[in-house]
Amino acid sequence: MKWITWMVLAVGVWGLVGGCKDKGQRGSSSEILIGEFASMTGATATFGQSSHEGLMLAVEQVNEKGGVLGKKVKVISEDNRSDANEAVTAVQKLISRDRVVAVIGEVASKRSLAGGGVCQQYKIPMLSPASTNPTVTQVGDYIFRICFTDDFQGGVCAKFAEKRGWKKVAIFTDVANDYSKGLTAGFKDGYQGTIVADESFREGDNDFKAQLTKIKATGPDAVFLPGYYTDVVKVVKQARQLELNVPFFGGDGWDSPTTLAAGAVMDGCFYTDHYSPDDPRPAVREFIAAYQKKYARTPDAMAILGYDAGMVMMDAIKRAGKSEPAAIRDALAATKGFPGASGTITIDEKRNARKPAFVLELKGGKTHIADTIEPG
Ligand code: PHE
């Protein structure tokens, strides 16, 4: 009986140690596991769907050429249903259950802030493709982005308003959205004209007539609307019904197939963005061609940023020489002059990227480049 007891004990201890060892070695699997949290469904589903498609294209291209460090890269995606609390749960799952070595996400700043807290806590590097709110990367030294920030984007909107001769601007902010509030702050910082109205709404509202009536009474030359596409089209439609016919303008949150599909009602409105499908640069043309081939549609800004986020992350893992979170973090921080499809990406000491912005004009369901502004 004695030897059996010992055997059982030994096997138990071996199993325990073996199990722990496996669990402890993040990055030891036969593939390199990267987590992605995205809004694949819910209110802002086009954000998540586009960035996901871009990311998958990048991974496919790299895997076709043999992968990274001799291994194939595998993306594990979690849908957060456009919800910040779900984003926390999604990232927790990716880190604890799936044991990913790095995380890509999110598009919306609010959800990047939520998921970023978890990544920072577990010291898992996170790279946001598209979140522009300045506070996102301030969450900690494991949080990075490959796009410009809203102090810059807000300044671009302010400069553009002045160039257009808009001396009186009304502001209409989504106060339930960190992104919107940050962009308004950036605009106010840079704008030299007069802000004649400063009204607010909350994401998901359906009736904007009271605020729009107030705005109309102040006689603005234009209305600054730093919201997401879901609300922007509703607001502009109601403004036109009230015969508030001045241009509306906003930031990258307008970018969605939904805004284009709204058609003529958005004519003469403008928004700043990371990308234009009319950009003649070869890297952009190549990306658009590959994306169209795979998905049979024209990519938007989230798609190209999702693609670049994937490429930068895989390049960092390669430079790290091992798929270990702390080493990947250091390699991400050292990213310099990376030739992205959306532009050259250098990560600065605040873990942000500085890139030019486009101002796009909407006409007949299409965008046209109205201006390009370099970071100062
Ligand atoms: N910049 C937005 C945010 O931080 C997200 C976004 C990026 C939306 C790119 C559209 C295009 O919330």
Image: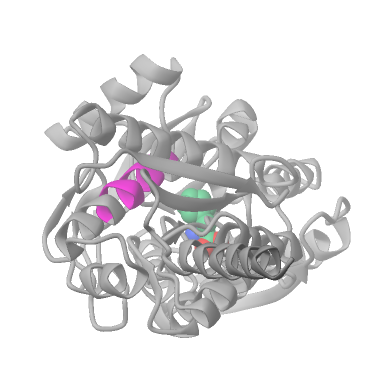
The tally of labels here is 0
| Residue range corresponding to the magenta coloring | 303-312
Looking at the rendered image, the quarter that the N terminus falls into is bottom right
Which residue does the image show at 55% across and 39% down from the upper left? 256
Q: What x and y, as percent, mark residue 126?
A: 43, 66
| x, y percent for residue 192 | 41, 81
Residue occupying image coordinates x 32% and y 40%:
369
Residue drawn at the location 31% of the way across and 72% of the way down: 329
User: In this orientation, which residue lies closer to the viewer: 339 or 223?
Assistant: 339
- Determine whether 236 is above or below 350 in the image: above
Membership of 265 in magenta stretch = no
Instruction: Give the left or right position of residue 96, taking residue 140 as reference.
Output: right
Instruction: Give the main secondary structure, helix, strand or loop, of the magenta stretch.
Output: helix
In terms of depth relative to the viewer, which is nearer, 218 or 122? 122
Q: Is residue 72 left or right of residue 78?
A: left
Q: Residue 225, located in which quarter of the rendered image?
A: bottom right
